[in-house]
Image (cartoon, rainbow, N blue to C red):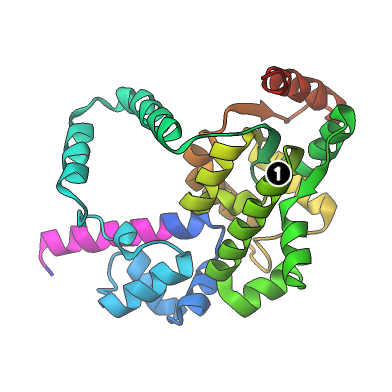
Amino acid sequence: MNRGDAAFGAEIGKLVRLGRAKRGMTRRQLAQDSRTSERYLAQIEGGAGNPSIVVMRAIAEALDVPLVELLPLSRGRSADFGRILDILQRLPTAELPAIADLIEQRVERVNGADRARRIALIGLRGAGKSTLGRMLADKLGFKFIELDRVIEQEYGASLPLLIEMSGLAGFRRYERAALEHVVAENETAVIATAGGIVSNPQTYGLLLRRTHTVWISARPEEHMSRVMRQGDFRPMAKNREAMSDLVAILDARRKDYARAEARLETSGVTAEQSLAKLTKIVTPWLKR
């Protein structure tokens, strides 16, 4: 393998690892969903797997992303898209957030963005979304909605069973449909979402356009201690490297979470103190 091929393989491995971490999937889960051996997947992620296009398609389907998202040199879109990428590559890195904001604002003007008085809380499990969501809903007199519970009610099965039957990609489709229903039926609501909702660009884009989003964040050790108190290690079940996996998931999702309209740090403060800060954040949105 020449140097260029090795670099290409290493970049594919990096993109697969990033996609897996963003979705909170273990290597074993991705191997099972893509019907690829765990050992071979480890080789791919290490840049030494030399996977076929069939294997890469299976991995992409398991991650619920277009195949091109796992091909670092792919630019198979329109000439205008290639031109945009070329312009962006010439910009200083510090300018990219402002450009991203301008593009997002333009898309919102074209497609419309009606957020009404819907408040959505995003972030990793253990940040306090459900606790603060209920408290905020009670204070505002709004309906509190846990999107995961809506999915279970609409499809008649628990989340683990739905994922087992349909795979993570199928579950993400259910999640988008449930979100569409919640938005269509509720002008006012406080919505607690699953941590991995940001892993699907279409679903997360819908959430950003149709709700006011707040990233509920906490330090990794706070996340872990809260999850332990809940007695639930999803998505780190049976994984001895729970903390390192949690940090990897947070790092992979950080940029997506940061697209929220506001961020609330909950580490080291009481729920009541966090509620007071959250109320202050959302109050201006409710006056529009």
Is residue 12 magenta-colored? yes
Query: Residue 106: x percent and y percent?
Result: 38, 30
Q: Residue at x 42, y 78 (%)?
A: 39
> Measuring 38% from the left and 27% from the top, which residue is drawn there?
97
**164 left or right of 107 in image:** right
Residue 161: percent from left, percent from top = 71, 75
| Quadrant housing the C terminus | top right
Part of the protein shown in magenta: 2-17
Identify which amino acid the numbered label 1 is placed on.
Answer: His
Badge count = 1
Residue in view at x 59 percent, y 57 percent? 176
Q: Which residue is mark 1?
A: 223
Q: Height in image: 55 above or below 127? A: below
Q: Position of residue 273 (x, y in %)?
A: 83, 22
Mark 1 element type: helix
Please state the horizontal and vertical placement of residue 244, each as a whole percent of the image. 57, 52
Majority SS type along the magenta span: helix
Residue 54 sits in which quadrant? bottom left
Question: Is residue 78 left or right of 62 when viewed as pictured?
Answer: left
